[in-house]
Amino acid sequence: MLQLLQIQKSYWQGEIEYPALKGINLDVNQGEMVALCGPSGSGKSTLLNICGLLDHQFEGEIRLAGTKVEKDPKQRMLLRRQQLGFVFQRFNLIPVMTVFENIAYPLTLNGVHPTQIKRRVSELLEAVGLAAFAQHRPDRLSGGQQQRVALARALVHEPLLVIADEPTASLDSKTAQQVVGLMRTIGAQQNTTFIIASHDERMTQHCDRIIHLQDGVLQAERDLCDSVLGENMNKQKVLSR
């Protein structure tokens, strides 16, 4: 569904070049939930911005649903509006809008009929357990409630791909598990692909794959099921000694 082909990105300070990404190749399947992990300075945020079509100053090629993404600003803007969703660590809700209006915003931008907007937003409000808060402003919600609103907003137009940047980092354990569960459930229903930058094990343990980035280079990918199986086998060996 998403292909990155030889993605390279550098930053310049005067005449000094600082490579951020060094020939990244990555294939992400439709409906897959992928965790992107790496230390500060690894290039994780840079790669996330490129996957989200927010940065066009790089070398290489992006393919979305089999089609090459051109670097034309208008085309990229339309793709972001119609095919992508975003979830941020700090929610980024619009404070002067109600919960309903925040979730409806992507549909409004895409010119969806008001009747369809009402139906779709109402469905998402029920799904994230916030139907009773539809007319509240974000400042009247808890952090977990705000993140559920942000998740509903990201998914309301049924995007192909959602980019999430540390979506559970500022949440307590119970709320983080709720948000992760909603991402898995609604994402599966819509066959949405997630790329999630996270260091939070509460998040990464529920992903299909964990991809590690180090110094602008992708390390060996790790399938979560294989990883868990290996850890369990090691524990059994220790216990059997």
Image (spheres, grey):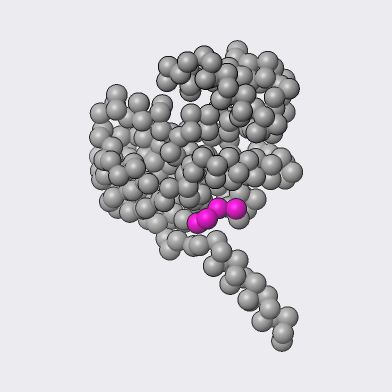
Query: Residue 85, image x and y in percent?
Result: 47, 33
**Could you tell me which quadrant the C terminus lies in?**
bottom right
Q: Residue at x 61, y 19 (%)?
A: 100
Q: How many marks?
A: 0
Query: Residue 165, image x and y in percent?
Result: 52, 39
Residue 100 versus residue 231 in the image, above or below: above
- For the record, the magenta segment spans 206-210
Q: Residue at x 48, y 33 (%)?
A: 158
Q: Classify residue 92 as left or right of residue 32.
A: right
Q: Residue at x 60, y 13 (%)?
A: 96
Q: Classify residue 177 as left or right of residue 211.
A: right
Q: Nearer the viewer, residue 97 or 13?
A: 97
Q: Quadrant of residue 131?
A: top right
Name the dominant secondary structure of the magenta segment: loop
Query: Residue 213, image x and y in percent?
Result: 44, 54
Is residue 178 visible from the viewing direction of this image? yes
Query: Residue 35, image x and y in percent?
Result: 51, 51
Q: Nearer the viewer, residue 213 or 163?
A: 163
Is residue 94 visible from the viewing direction of this image? no
Q: Residue at x 74, y 43 (%)?
A: 174
Q: Nearer the viewer, residue 160 or 119?
A: 119
Residue 170 versus residue 227 in the image, above or below: above
